[in-house]
Amino acid sequence: MAFIDATSAGGDGGFMLDIEAKHKDDMEAIMHFIEMMNRHSSGMIHKITVVNSSTFPVEEPYVHQPLADKANPDDSFNLEEKTWFELIISVNL
């Protein structure tokens, strides 16, 4: 999963995308995704953060700052199920 921080005509915002990777260490696919998003964003995307999602607690949970107020006290999120994020890579563009 990737958090995309961007700026549009409406102002700063962002969105979440699923990405295709064989596993969380598939850096070739992850870097390809980041390069493709950068190439096609017309400068609107300024940060891409790729995370692994888990329905089990992770050792070091990642909380994306724009969503921090939605996190549970244990740093999980209430998505379809209780979900934790584990940081893989964050790239400023």
Image: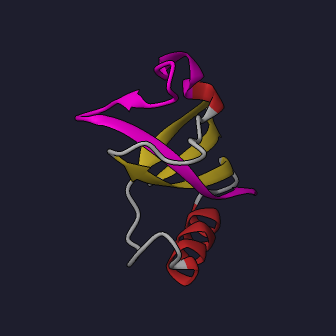
In the rendered image, residue 31 lying in the magenta stretch gets the answer: no
Q: Quadrant of the C terminus?
A: bottom right
Q: Is residue 50 above or below residue 61?
A: below
Along the line of sight, the residue nearer the viewer: 52 or 38: 52
Residue under the point 41% across and 29% down: 77
Residue under the point 36% across and 38% down: 83
Q: How is the image coloured?
A: secondary structure
Residue under the point 25% across and 35% down: 81
Residue at the extreme left: 80
Along the line of sight, the residue nearer the viewer: 35 or 75: 75
**Numbered circles on residues, count:** 0
Left or right side of 80 for 34 = right
The answer to whether residue 11 is seen in the rendering is no
The answer to whether residue 23 is seen in the rendering is yes
Residue stretch rendered in magenta on the structure: 67-93
**Percent of width and height locating residue 86:** 54, 51
